[in-house]
Image (cartoon, rainbow, N blue to C red):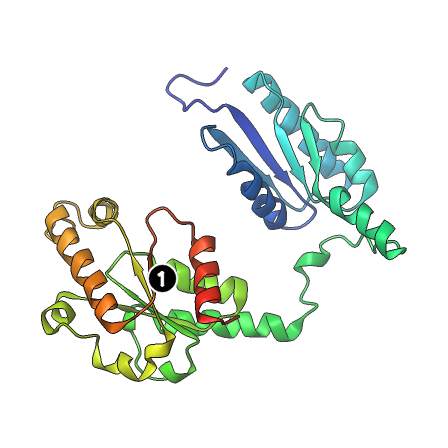
Amino acid sequence: MPEPGSPHYDRTIFYISDGTGITAETFGHSLLTQFEHLRLREVRLPFVDSVEKARQAVERIDRQALLDRHRPIVFSTLVDASINDVVRLANCRFLDLFATFVEPLESEFGVRSTHTIGRSHTATNTEAYQRRIAAINYSLAHDDGQQHADLANAEVILIGVSRSGKTPTSLYLAMQHGIRAANYPLIPDDFERRRLPMVLYRYKPKLFGLSIAPERLSEIRNERRPGSRYASLENCRYEVREAEALMRREGIRWLSSTTKSIEEIAATILQQLDIG
């Protein structure tokens, strides 16, 4: 039984992999978003690359099944058949992501897959890997308007009020897509002038705006600076209203980040600016 005072979860989800587990977790998250009212405990079990580690994983899954009184859901990207067979013995609902897709592809291509452990996380594409690293460094150097230099090399420049989601979106674009993304804050001085920061006009085709519901913005800012004017709902309403009006006047494409995931925001930016 759960300890007194501990949160109640409907089910426990395990992501198990011979590598980092990121692939299993990403795919699992995509599926689980279809069940929005469930409260799920999520556990990642990475680097399960031997039969002994597989047995340890089974013990952990079985213990959780006893505690929950429901069998856990296991998303697996295990490649080695002998390791996979061990984990299948756990008291769980086992979802083998590789088998679901690899076996039909083997049949279609008429060849066997390599079944190489950790293959999806090796630096087999050095050029793409180096591009992502360079993009991450670029985005960090051009976060929150830190640098004006080299903006000509940006592929996108995100603008919006403070805490509207610019930094995480910039880093996601860099890490996942190798996109050089800078971001620039819109501040009260810009609203008083009714103009963008002057440095941005020469790069206007690269601009994309993020907005956010004032109520959500106030919540986020209060976590950082509780009780401040910066976080007050009145100020947040003013900044969001003025920022959206400015973007409309300047003809800048923008969206609200309030109910969208970073993945959705990034996909929209890539599509609308035709980059990536």
Estimate the x, y position of residue 122 in percent, counting from the top left: 68, 62
Is 221 situated above or below 276?
Answer: above
| Quadrant in the rendering for residue 210 | bottom left
Task: Looking at the picture, tell me which residue is in the foreground, 219 or 256.
Answer: 256
Q: Residue at x 12, y 45 (%)?
A: 227
Q: Residue at x 62, y 30 (%)?
A: 73
Q: Residue at x 86, y 50 (%)?
A: 107
The secondary structure type at the circle numbered 1 is helix
Q: Amino acid at mark 1?
A: Thr
Q: Residue under circle 1?
A: 167
Is 5 situated above or below 209?
Answer: above
Left/right placement of residue 174 relative to residue 111 reads left
Q: Residues within 10 Å of mark 1 (few under 14, many from 20)?
A: many
Left/right placement of residue 42 relative to residue 170 reads right
Left/right placement of residue 215 relative to residue 156 reads left
| Quadrant in the rendering for residue 82 | top right
Count how many numbered circles sit on residues in the image: 1
